[in-house]
Image: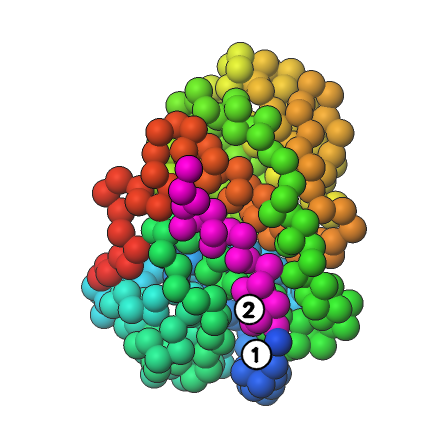
Amino acid sequence: MTQSHMAREVAEIPQVVARFLADSQGVLGAAAAALRQTDPGVIATVARGSSDHAAAYLKYAIELQTGIPVASVGPSIASIYKRPLRLAGGACIGISQSGRSPDIVEMMQASTDSGALSIAITNHADSPMALASAHCLPLQAGEEKSVAATKTFVASVLAGLALLAEWSDDESLRDSIAALPDALQQAVSLDWTPLAARLARAQHAFVLGRGPGFAIANEAALKMKETSGIHAEAYSAAEVLHGPAAIVQSSFPVLALGVDDAALPQLAATASRLADQGADVFVTGADVPGATILPSVPGLHPLLAPLSLIVSYYACVEGLARRRGFDPDTPPHLRKVTETR
């Protein structure tokens, strides 16, 4: 069987991460210095799709590390409604694989014009979004041929985390990021086939997480929809108990993405409750009675551990798509660059 573009691009992730870290010290240092000088009281993010999940990951990481509130801004505020936002003294981080979607570009230009410190994270350093921003962190991920973003998603999160480490001058986070390529190489090879075997006959699923892991849950649910035709929904492991848990009946598939941080006991408790309701629960990072434990890379920094989980999941969902009769490279009704207003 011919290897899919998606499979090749997932396998490239450790090398993409290593290349970014080796080649990006100059741009990271300049953007970090600008953040220290600006000392923003608030940070806005601008993104859509997988890039918005990367932005959500960085929201949690920045808030946990610095205490600065981070909020997602709807690009249509600039592109459709033409309403200037009062972002002077703040910062705005835009994330887009292509850097070409008109609404993202307009919002980043409006942020720059408003006096915000604008930072673009994109695979294309010469893209309109990059040119509309004061700083750019080019991902250098190479061409991504599969419609489903994988290596650019991981590289986008990495770029934001590396910027955070430099901005906050956190030596522990910086050292952990330097070791990330080896950890992701392990993650690519972990066996999540028990999850794929269960989802091969599924029509619906929940994916749960907390903190940065909730951002990864959203990305995992999106990939289940895109590549495998499964109606998957992501929830905070707390929020799922406020209503959605009511539809979890016997054999309902649930993926709970746990990492070794302060939220793990609560996530494990939620996973246990859903298993007691009869759900087919798959969990990482915790021993939950009645659930299937999926392997994960041990000993990672809590801000990095969720990123390793999505790499293992990507390898799993690529095989799941083929198992369900889908081409993971060309999801129906989608294209690589989505230009919205």
Q: Secondary structure at mark 1?
A: loop
Kindly report the distance in space between the C-alpha atoms of the residues bearing marks 1 and 2: 9 Å
Number of other residues with Cα within 10 Å of mark 2, as a class: few under 14, some 14 to 19, many 20 or more: many
Residue drawn at x 30%, y 77% as measured from the top left? 128
Q: Position of residue 49 (x, y in %)?
A: 38, 52
In the image, the segment drawn in magenta is: 1-21
Is 252 drawn above or below residue 330 in the view shown?
above
Q: Position of residue 144 (x, y in %)?
A: 39, 59
Q: Are marks 1 and 2 in contact (CB under 8 Å)?
A: yes
Residue 311: say if magenta: no
Task: Name the residue tied to disc 2.
Answer: 159
Placement of the N terminus among the 4 image quadrants: top left
- Side of 161 relative to 202 (left or right): right
Residue 5: say if magenta: yes
Q: Secondary structure at mark 2?
A: helix
Placement of the C terminus among the 4 image quadrants: bottom left
Q: Is residue 110 visible?
A: no
Is 99 drawn above or below residue 130 in the view shown?
above
Q: Position of residue 220 (x, y in %)?
A: 49, 42
| Residue type marked 1 | Ser
